[in-house]
Protein backbone atom coordinates (compact mmCIF):
# COMPACT_ATOMS: atom_id res chain seq x y z
CA UNK A 1 0.00 0.00 0.00
CA UNK A 2 2.73 2.41 0.98
CA UNK A 3 4.54 1.70 -2.21
CA UNK A 4 1.45 2.27 -4.31
CA UNK A 5 0.89 5.64 -2.65
CA UNK A 6 4.47 6.47 -3.34
CA UNK A 7 3.92 5.33 -6.90
CA UNK A 8 0.93 7.60 -7.38
CA UNK A 9 3.10 10.40 -6.07
CA UNK A 10 5.73 9.47 -8.59
CA UNK A 11 3.44 9.44 -11.56
CA UNK A 12 2.00 12.73 -10.64
CA UNK A 13 -1.34 12.36 -9.01
CA UNK A 14 -0.20 13.63 -5.66
CA UNK A 15 3.11 15.37 -6.17
CA UNK A 16 1.99 17.21 -9.23
CA UNK A 17 -1.59 17.37 -8.09
CA UNK A 18 -2.25 20.74 -9.64
CA UNK A 19 -0.79 19.69 -12.89
CA UNK A 20 -2.72 16.47 -13.05
CA UNK A 21 -5.99 18.22 -12.37
CA UNK A 22 -5.26 20.79 -14.99
CA UNK A 23 -4.82 18.01 -17.51
CA UNK A 24 -8.35 16.82 -16.81
CA UNK A 25 -10.50 18.48 -19.36
CA UNK A 26 -14.11 18.59 -18.36
CA UNK A 27 -16.31 17.90 -21.32
CA UNK A 28 -18.98 20.41 -22.17
CA UNK A 29 -21.63 18.40 -20.36
CA UNK A 30 -19.76 18.51 -17.07
CA UNK A 31 -20.90 20.91 -14.43
CA UNK A 32 -20.89 21.30 -10.72
CA UNK A 33 -24.17 20.57 -9.03
CA UNK A 34 -25.67 23.35 -6.93
CA UNK A 35 -24.20 21.68 -3.87
CA UNK A 36 -20.77 21.91 -5.49
CA UNK A 37 -20.44 18.15 -5.92
CA UNK A 38 -18.61 16.89 -8.95
CA UNK A 39 -20.79 15.35 -11.59
CA UNK A 40 -20.48 11.77 -12.67
CA UNK A 41 -18.13 12.44 -15.56
CA UNK A 42 -15.34 13.63 -13.35
CA UNK A 43 -15.80 10.67 -11.10
CA UNK A 44 -15.73 8.40 -14.11
CA UNK A 45 -12.54 10.05 -15.34
CA UNK A 46 -10.99 9.69 -11.91
CA UNK A 47 -11.92 6.03 -11.78
CA UNK A 48 -10.46 5.36 -15.23
CA UNK A 49 -7.29 7.18 -14.31
CA UNK A 50 -6.87 5.09 -11.16
CA UNK A 51 -7.33 1.93 -13.20
CA UNK A 52 -4.72 2.98 -15.73
CA UNK A 53 -2.31 3.89 -12.93
CA UNK A 54 -2.87 0.51 -11.33
CA UNK A 55 -2.09 -1.12 -14.65
CA UNK A 56 1.07 0.94 -14.86
CA UNK A 57 2.01 -0.03 -11.32
CA UNK A 58 1.56 -3.70 -12.17
CA UNK A 59 4.36 -3.38 -14.73
CA UNK A 60 6.84 -2.72 -11.97
CA UNK A 61 8.48 -5.21 -9.65
CA UNK A 62 9.40 -2.52 -7.20
CA UNK A 63 8.45 1.15 -7.78
CA UNK A 64 10.90 2.37 -5.12
CA UNK A 65 13.79 1.44 -7.46
CA UNK A 66 12.87 4.52 -9.51
CA UNK A 67 12.66 6.87 -6.55
CA UNK A 68 15.56 9.27 -7.10
CA UNK A 69 15.75 10.25 -3.46
CA UNK A 70 16.38 6.80 -2.03
CA UNK A 71 19.69 4.99 -2.02
CA UNK A 72 19.63 2.03 -4.40
CA UNK A 73 20.58 -1.47 -3.25
CA UNK A 74 23.46 -1.61 -5.68
CA UNK A 75 25.30 0.99 -7.70
CA UNK A 76 27.50 1.17 -10.74
CA UNK A 77 30.92 1.88 -9.25
CA UNK A 78 32.65 4.76 -10.99
CA UNK A 79 36.35 4.18 -11.52
CA UNK A 80 37.09 7.34 -9.51
CA UNK A 81 35.94 5.41 -6.44
CA UNK A 82 39.24 3.54 -6.71
CA UNK A 83 41.20 6.75 -6.32
CA UNK A 84 39.07 7.71 -3.33
CA UNK A 85 39.64 4.22 -1.90
CA UNK A 86 43.40 4.56 -2.35
CA UNK A 87 43.51 7.89 -0.56
CA UNK A 88 41.31 6.74 2.27
CA UNK A 89 43.13 3.42 2.75
CA UNK A 90 46.34 5.38 3.14
CA UNK A 91 44.64 7.67 5.59
CA UNK A 92 43.30 4.73 7.55
CA UNK A 93 46.73 3.17 7.92
CA UNK A 94 48.96 6.21 8.35
CA UNK A 95 46.44 8.51 9.99
CA UNK A 96 47.57 11.54 8.00
CA UNK A 97 44.52 13.41 6.73
CA UNK A 98 43.84 13.33 3.02
CA UNK A 99 41.38 15.99 2.05
CA UNK A 100 39.54 15.75 -1.25
CA UNK A 101 37.38 17.93 -3.44
CA UNK A 102 35.20 15.98 -5.84
CA UNK A 103 33.93 18.02 -8.75
CA UNK A 104 31.19 16.89 -11.07
CA UNK A 105 28.02 18.00 -12.80
CA UNK A 106 24.54 17.27 -11.53
CA UNK A 107 23.54 13.65 -11.78
CA UNK A 108 27.11 12.39 -12.15
CA UNK A 109 26.78 10.23 -9.04
CA UNK A 110 28.79 12.31 -6.53
CA UNK A 111 26.34 11.87 -3.70
CA UNK A 112 25.51 8.24 -4.34
CA UNK A 113 29.18 7.26 -4.77
CA UNK A 114 30.27 8.93 -1.55
CA UNK A 115 27.36 7.53 0.47
CA UNK A 116 28.27 4.10 -0.84
CA UNK A 117 31.86 4.67 0.23
CA UNK A 118 30.90 5.93 3.69
CA UNK A 119 29.12 2.63 4.25
CA UNK A 120 32.36 0.81 3.55
CA UNK A 121 34.22 3.05 5.99
CA UNK A 122 31.68 2.31 8.69
CA UNK A 123 32.50 -1.39 8.36
CA UNK A 124 36.06 -0.42 9.28
CA UNK A 125 34.80 1.45 12.31
CA UNK A 126 35.88 4.78 10.93
CA UNK A 127 33.78 7.59 12.28
CA UNK A 128 31.91 9.40 9.52
CA UNK A 129 29.87 12.56 9.24
CA UNK A 130 27.78 13.68 6.27
CA UNK A 131 26.05 16.99 5.72
CA UNK A 132 24.53 18.87 2.78
CA UNK A 133 25.66 22.49 2.72
CA UNK A 134 22.39 23.47 1.12
CA UNK A 135 20.73 22.52 4.41
CA UNK A 136 23.57 23.73 6.67
CA UNK A 137 25.29 26.51 4.73
CA UNK A 138 27.37 28.06 7.53
CA UNK A 139 30.14 26.60 9.65
CA UNK A 140 28.03 27.37 12.70
CA UNK A 141 25.08 25.26 11.51
CA UNK A 142 27.42 22.40 10.63
CA UNK A 143 28.95 22.54 14.12
CA UNK A 144 25.42 22.34 15.49
CA UNK A 145 24.75 19.23 13.49
CA UNK A 146 28.10 17.70 14.46
CA UNK A 147 27.40 18.18 18.14
CA UNK A 148 23.67 17.51 17.97
CA UNK A 149 22.79 20.88 19.41
CA UNK A 150 19.60 22.31 18.04
CA UNK A 151 19.23 25.52 19.92
CA UNK A 152 21.11 28.68 19.13
CA UNK A 153 22.71 30.49 22.01
CA UNK A 154 26.02 28.72 22.13
CA UNK A 155 28.84 31.06 21.52
CA UNK A 156 30.28 30.20 18.06
CA UNK A 157 33.74 29.54 19.47
CA UNK A 158 32.42 27.27 22.19
CA UNK A 159 30.36 25.35 19.66
CA UNK A 160 33.37 25.04 17.36
CA UNK A 161 35.52 23.69 20.18
CA UNK A 162 32.92 21.06 20.94
CA UNK A 163 32.71 20.07 17.26
CA UNK A 164 36.50 19.87 16.96
CA UNK A 165 36.64 17.61 20.01
CA UNK A 166 33.97 15.35 18.52
CA UNK A 167 36.08 14.69 15.40
CA UNK A 168 39.57 15.09 16.79
CA UNK A 169 40.65 11.55 15.92
CA UNK A 170 40.41 9.55 12.74
CA UNK A 171 37.15 10.40 10.99
CA UNK A 172 35.82 11.31 7.58
CA UNK A 173 33.73 14.44 7.20
CA UNK A 174 31.75 14.87 3.99
CA UNK A 175 30.28 18.21 3.00
CA UNK A 176 27.99 17.61 0.05
CA UNK A 177 26.73 20.43 -2.19
CA UNK A 178 29.69 22.44 -0.93
CA UNK A 179 28.92 25.15 -3.49
CA UNK A 180 26.39 26.41 -0.96
CA UNK A 181 28.95 26.97 1.82
CA UNK A 182 28.77 30.57 2.97
CA UNK A 183 32.05 30.55 4.88
CA UNK A 184 35.09 28.29 5.08
CA UNK A 185 36.10 28.61 8.71
CA UNK A 186 35.15 25.00 9.38
CA UNK A 187 37.67 23.87 6.74
CA UNK A 188 40.38 26.01 8.26
CA UNK A 189 39.93 24.81 11.83
CA UNK A 190 39.35 21.15 11.05
CA UNK A 191 42.35 20.89 8.78
CA UNK A 192 44.55 22.58 11.39
CA UNK A 193 43.33 21.11 14.64
CA UNK A 194 42.06 17.59 13.95
CA UNK A 195 43.08 14.36 12.27
CA UNK A 196 39.84 14.23 10.31
CA UNK A 197 39.83 13.94 6.52
CA UNK A 198 37.43 16.27 4.77
CA UNK A 199 35.70 15.42 1.49
CA UNK A 200 33.92 18.23 -0.32
CA UNK A 201 31.52 17.57 -3.20
CA UNK A 202 30.96 20.47 -5.58
CA UNK A 203 29.33 21.12 -8.87
CA UNK A 204 31.08 24.31 -9.87
CA UNK A 205 34.58 23.75 -11.12
CA UNK A 206 35.50 27.18 -9.73
CA UNK A 207 34.50 26.22 -6.21
CA UNK A 208 38.06 25.76 -4.91
CA UNK A 209 38.96 29.28 -6.04
CA UNK A 210 36.46 30.72 -3.59
CA UNK A 211 38.37 29.26 -0.63
CA UNK A 212 40.79 31.78 0.90
CA UNK A 213 44.47 31.07 0.56
CA UNK A 214 45.22 30.37 4.21
CA UNK A 215 42.45 27.79 4.39
CA UNK A 216 43.30 26.23 1.03
CA UNK A 217 46.94 25.78 1.96
CA UNK A 218 46.12 23.93 5.14
CA UNK A 219 43.43 21.89 3.42
CA UNK A 220 45.63 20.99 0.43
CA UNK A 221 42.93 18.91 -1.21
CA UNK A 222 43.40 16.26 -3.86
CA UNK A 223 41.04 17.01 -6.71
CA UNK A 224 38.94 14.34 -8.33
CA UNK A 225 36.75 15.01 -11.35
CA UNK A 226 33.58 13.09 -12.06
CA UNK A 227 32.99 13.59 -15.74
CA UNK A 228 29.52 13.40 -17.27
CA UNK A 229 28.40 9.81 -17.60
CA UNK A 230 28.95 8.32 -21.04
CA UNK A 231 26.44 6.06 -22.73
CA UNK A 232 28.11 2.88 -21.48
CA UNK A 233 28.04 3.95 -17.82
CA UNK A 234 24.42 5.08 -18.12
CA UNK A 235 23.53 1.79 -19.72
CA UNK A 236 25.00 -0.08 -16.73
CA UNK A 237 23.06 2.12 -14.30
CA UNK A 238 19.83 1.67 -16.24
CA UNK A 239 20.30 -2.08 -16.53
CA UNK A 240 20.53 -2.44 -12.75
CA UNK A 241 17.39 -0.36 -12.25
CA UNK A 242 15.51 -2.24 -14.97
CA UNK A 243 16.48 -5.61 -13.51
CA UNK A 244 15.54 -4.60 -9.98
CA UNK A 245 12.48 -2.54 -10.74
CA UNK A 246 10.66 -3.65 -13.86
CA UNK A 247 9.07 -6.96 -14.83
CA UNK A 248 10.07 -6.58 -18.46
CA UNK A 249 12.75 -4.55 -20.17
CA UNK A 250 14.69 -4.39 -23.36
CA UNK A 251 18.43 -3.88 -23.71
CA UNK A 252 18.29 -1.97 -27.00
CA UNK A 253 15.90 0.56 -25.48
CA UNK A 254 18.19 1.00 -22.50
CA UNK A 255 21.01 1.69 -24.93
CA UNK A 256 18.90 4.24 -26.76
CA UNK A 257 18.04 6.08 -23.53
CA UNK A 258 21.69 5.96 -22.44
CA UNK A 259 22.89 7.31 -25.78
CA UNK A 260 20.41 10.18 -25.92
CA UNK A 261 20.90 11.22 -22.30
CA UNK A 262 24.67 11.20 -22.60
CA UNK A 263 24.53 13.18 -25.84
CA UNK A 264 21.79 15.71 -25.10
CA UNK A 265 21.42 15.86 -21.31
CA UNK A 266 24.98 15.99 -19.94
CA UNK A 267 24.78 12.32 -18.98
CA UNK A 268 22.52 13.23 -16.07
CA UNK A 269 21.64 9.89 -14.44
CA UNK A 270 18.49 11.36 -12.91
CA UNK A 271 17.02 12.00 -16.34
CA UNK A 272 18.01 8.54 -17.58
CA UNK A 273 16.42 6.77 -14.60
CA UNK A 274 13.27 8.84 -14.77
CA UNK A 275 13.00 8.20 -18.52
CA UNK A 276 13.36 4.48 -17.87
CA UNK A 277 10.52 4.72 -15.38
CA UNK A 278 8.31 6.51 -17.91
CA UNK A 279 9.05 3.87 -20.52
CA UNK A 280 8.44 1.00 -18.10
CA UNK A 281 5.03 2.18 -16.89
CA UNK A 282 3.76 2.90 -20.39
CA UNK A 283 5.25 -0.27 -21.81
CA UNK A 284 6.89 1.81 -24.55
CA UNK A 285 9.85 -0.53 -24.96
CA UNK A 286 9.48 -1.02 -28.66
CA UNK A 287 8.38 2.41 -29.80
CA UNK A 288 11.33 4.69 -30.49
CA UNK A 289 9.22 7.83 -30.72
CA UNK A 290 7.63 7.14 -27.34
CA UNK A 291 11.04 6.48 -25.81
CA UNK A 292 12.31 9.82 -27.09
CA UNK A 293 9.27 11.56 -25.65
CA UNK A 294 9.75 9.76 -22.35
CA UNK A 295 13.21 11.31 -22.14
CA UNK A 296 11.93 14.80 -22.91
CA UNK A 297 9.23 14.34 -20.30
CA UNK A 298 11.79 13.07 -17.77
CA UNK A 299 13.90 16.17 -18.25
CA UNK A 300 10.86 18.36 -17.74
CA UNK A 301 9.91 16.47 -14.60
CA UNK A 302 13.39 16.89 -13.14
CA UNK A 303 13.21 20.62 -13.91
CA UNK A 304 9.82 20.87 -12.22
CA UNK A 305 11.19 19.08 -9.14
CA UNK A 306 13.99 21.67 -8.90
CA UNK A 307 11.53 24.53 -9.32
CA UNK A 308 9.20 23.17 -6.65
CA UNK A 309 12.04 23.38 -4.14
CA UNK A 310 12.55 27.10 -4.71
CA UNK A 311 11.31 29.77 -2.34
CA UNK A 312 8.88 32.34 -3.80
CA UNK A 313 11.48 35.06 -4.18
CA UNK A 314 13.95 32.69 -5.85
CA UNK A 315 11.34 31.51 -8.34
CA UNK A 316 10.41 35.09 -9.23
CA UNK A 317 14.07 36.03 -9.67
CA UNK A 318 14.53 33.05 -11.98
CA UNK A 319 11.42 34.00 -13.91
CA UNK A 320 12.65 37.55 -14.36
CA UNK A 321 16.13 36.60 -15.54
CA UNK A 322 14.62 34.08 -17.93
CA UNK A 323 13.01 37.07 -19.66
CA UNK A 324 15.57 39.80 -19.07
CA UNK A 325 19.10 38.53 -19.39
CA UNK A 326 20.93 41.64 -18.22
CA UNK A 327 21.00 41.48 -14.44
CA UNK A 328 20.84 45.20 -13.58
CA UNK A 329 17.71 45.62 -15.68
CA UNK A 330 16.34 42.39 -14.29
CA UNK A 331 16.80 43.71 -10.75
CA UNK A 332 14.45 46.65 -11.39
CA UNK A 333 11.75 44.44 -12.86
CA UNK A 334 12.22 41.96 -10.04
CA UNK A 335 11.23 44.55 -7.48
CA UNK A 336 8.16 45.52 -9.51
CA UNK A 337 7.10 41.91 -9.24
CA UNK A 338 7.87 41.80 -5.54
CA UNK A 339 5.59 44.77 -5.17
CA UNK A 340 2.82 42.98 -7.09
CA UNK A 341 2.87 40.05 -4.69
CA UNK A 342 2.98 42.41 -1.71
CA UNK A 343 6.50 41.47 -0.78
CA UNK A 344 8.98 44.08 0.37
CA UNK A 345 11.64 45.03 -2.20
CA UNK A 346 15.06 43.43 -1.95
CA UNK A 347 18.39 45.23 -2.04
CA UNK A 348 20.65 44.72 -5.02
CA UNK A 349 23.14 42.55 -3.07
CA UNK A 350 20.25 40.38 -1.88
CA UNK A 351 19.11 39.96 -5.49
CA UNK A 352 22.63 38.99 -6.57
CA UNK A 353 22.83 36.49 -3.73
CA UNK A 354 19.71 34.85 -5.14
CA UNK A 355 21.35 34.69 -8.58
CA UNK A 356 24.39 32.97 -7.04
CA UNK A 357 22.10 30.54 -5.32
CA UNK A 358 20.30 29.78 -8.59
CA UNK A 359 23.68 29.26 -10.22
CA UNK A 360 24.70 26.80 -7.50
CA UNK A 361 21.52 24.89 -8.18
CA UNK A 362 22.59 24.60 -11.80
CA UNK A 363 19.57 26.53 -13.05
CA UNK A 364 21.49 29.46 -14.55
CA UNK A 365 25.02 30.60 -15.28
CA UNK A 366 26.15 34.16 -14.98
CA UNK A 367 28.32 35.42 -17.77
CA UNK A 368 30.35 38.66 -17.60
CA UNK A 369 30.13 40.63 -20.83
CA UNK A 370 31.92 43.72 -21.95
CA UNK A 371 29.65 46.32 -23.50
CA UNK A 372 31.70 49.31 -24.68
CA UNK A 373 33.75 50.38 -21.68
CA UNK A 374 31.66 48.59 -19.13
CA UNK A 375 31.09 45.09 -17.88
CA UNK A 376 27.64 43.72 -17.39
CA UNK A 377 26.46 40.35 -16.21
CA UNK A 378 24.11 38.33 -18.35
CA UNK A 379 22.25 35.16 -17.64
CA UNK A 380 22.39 31.88 -19.52
CA UNK A 381 19.38 29.78 -18.74
CA UNK A 382 20.02 26.09 -18.10
CA UNK A 383 16.38 25.15 -17.73
CA UNK A 384 13.51 25.42 -20.15
CA UNK A 385 11.93 28.87 -20.15
CA UNK A 386 8.42 27.53 -20.67
CA UNK A 387 8.68 25.23 -17.66
CA UNK A 388 9.58 28.22 -15.49
CA UNK A 389 6.63 30.14 -16.84
CA UNK A 390 4.28 27.25 -16.12
CA UNK A 391 5.53 26.96 -12.56
CA UNK A 392 5.09 30.71 -12.05
CA UNK A 393 1.58 30.44 -13.48
CA UNK A 394 0.60 27.84 -10.90
CA UNK A 395 1.93 29.94 -8.03
CA UNK A 396 1.46 33.58 -9.05
CA UNK A 397 -1.02 33.86 -11.86
CA UNK A 398 -1.20 37.60 -11.09
CA UNK A 399 2.35 38.08 -12.41
CA UNK A 400 1.51 36.87 -15.88
CA UNK A 401 -1.37 39.20 -16.56
N1 LIG B 1 26.79 5.08 -10.33
C1 LIG B 1 25.48 5.05 -10.07
N2 LIG B 1 24.86 3.88 -9.79
C2 LIG B 1 23.56 3.86 -9.50
N3 LIG B 1 22.77 4.95 -9.46
C3 LIG B 1 23.34 6.15 -9.74
C4 LIG B 1 24.71 6.24 -10.06
N4 LIG B 1 25.01 7.54 -10.29
C5 LIG B 1 23.89 8.22 -10.11
N5 LIG B 1 22.87 7.39 -9.77
C6 LIG B 1 21.50 7.81 -9.46
O1 LIG B 1 21.23 9.01 -10.16
C7 LIG B 1 20.70 10.01 -9.32
C8 LIG B 1 21.66 11.19 -9.26
O2 LIG B 1 22.87 10.79 -8.61
P1 LIG B 1 23.57 11.69 -7.51
O3 LIG B 1 24.55 10.88 -6.78
O4 LIG B 1 22.53 12.38 -6.69
O5 LIG B 1 24.31 12.76 -8.44
P2 LIG B 1 25.05 14.10 -8.00
O6 LIG B 1 25.22 14.08 -6.51
O7 LIG B 1 26.34 14.06 -8.75
O8 LIG B 1 24.14 15.21 -8.48
C9 LIG B 1 20.48 9.36 -7.97
O9 LIG B 1 19.13 8.96 -7.86
C10 LIG B 1 21.41 8.16 -7.98
O10 LIG B 1 20.87 7.11 -7.22
MG1 LIG C 1 24.49 15.36 -5.04
Image: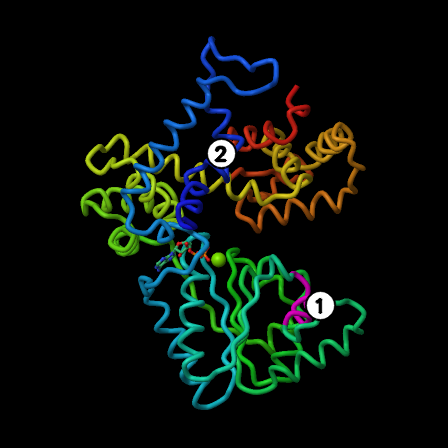
Magenta run includes residue 143: yes
Residue numbers of the magenta segment: 137-145
The label shown at residue 150 is 1
Q: Residue 73: where, in percent of width, then height?
A: 34, 63
Ligand 1 location (quadrant): bottom left
Work out whether 204 lies above or below 46.
below
Whether disc 2's CB lies below 8 Å from ligand 1 is answered no
Q: Secondary structure at mark 2?
A: loop
Task: Tell me, yes or no, whether the two marked residues, 2 and 1, touch with CB atoms within 8 Å.
Answer: no
Left or right: 128 as drawn, with respect to 269:
right
Instruction: Return the x and y of residue 63 as percentages of the image width and height.
Output: 35, 49
From the image, give the main secondary structure of the stretch colored magenta: helix
Q: Nearer the viewer, mark 2 or mark 1?
A: 1
Residue 261 found in image quarter: top left
Q: With respect to residue 312, does 396 lie above or below?
A: above
Q: Residue furthest top?
A: 28
Mark 1 neighbour class, 10 Å CA radius: few under 14, some 14 to 19, many 20 or more: few
For label 2, the residue is 384
Quadrant of image for the C terminus: top right
Judge whether 209 appears above or below 290 on screen.
below
Q: Is residue 233 visible?
A: no
Q: Residue at x 52, y 73 (%)?
A: 221
The one nearer the camera, 364 or 125, is 125
Magenta run includes residue 324: no
Q: Residue 284, labelled with which disc?
A: none
Amino acid sequence: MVSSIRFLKEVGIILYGGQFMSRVELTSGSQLTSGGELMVETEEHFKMKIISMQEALAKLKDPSVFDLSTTPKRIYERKELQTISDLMAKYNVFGIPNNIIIYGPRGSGKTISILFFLNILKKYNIKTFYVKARECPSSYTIYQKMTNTQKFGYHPIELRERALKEFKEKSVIVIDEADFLEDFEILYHFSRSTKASIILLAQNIQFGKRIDEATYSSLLPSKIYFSEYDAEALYQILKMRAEDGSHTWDGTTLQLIAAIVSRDYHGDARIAIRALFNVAITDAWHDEEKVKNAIIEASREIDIMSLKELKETDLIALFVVSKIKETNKAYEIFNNYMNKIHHRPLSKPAFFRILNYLQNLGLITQVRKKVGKYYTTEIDLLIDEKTIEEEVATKFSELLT
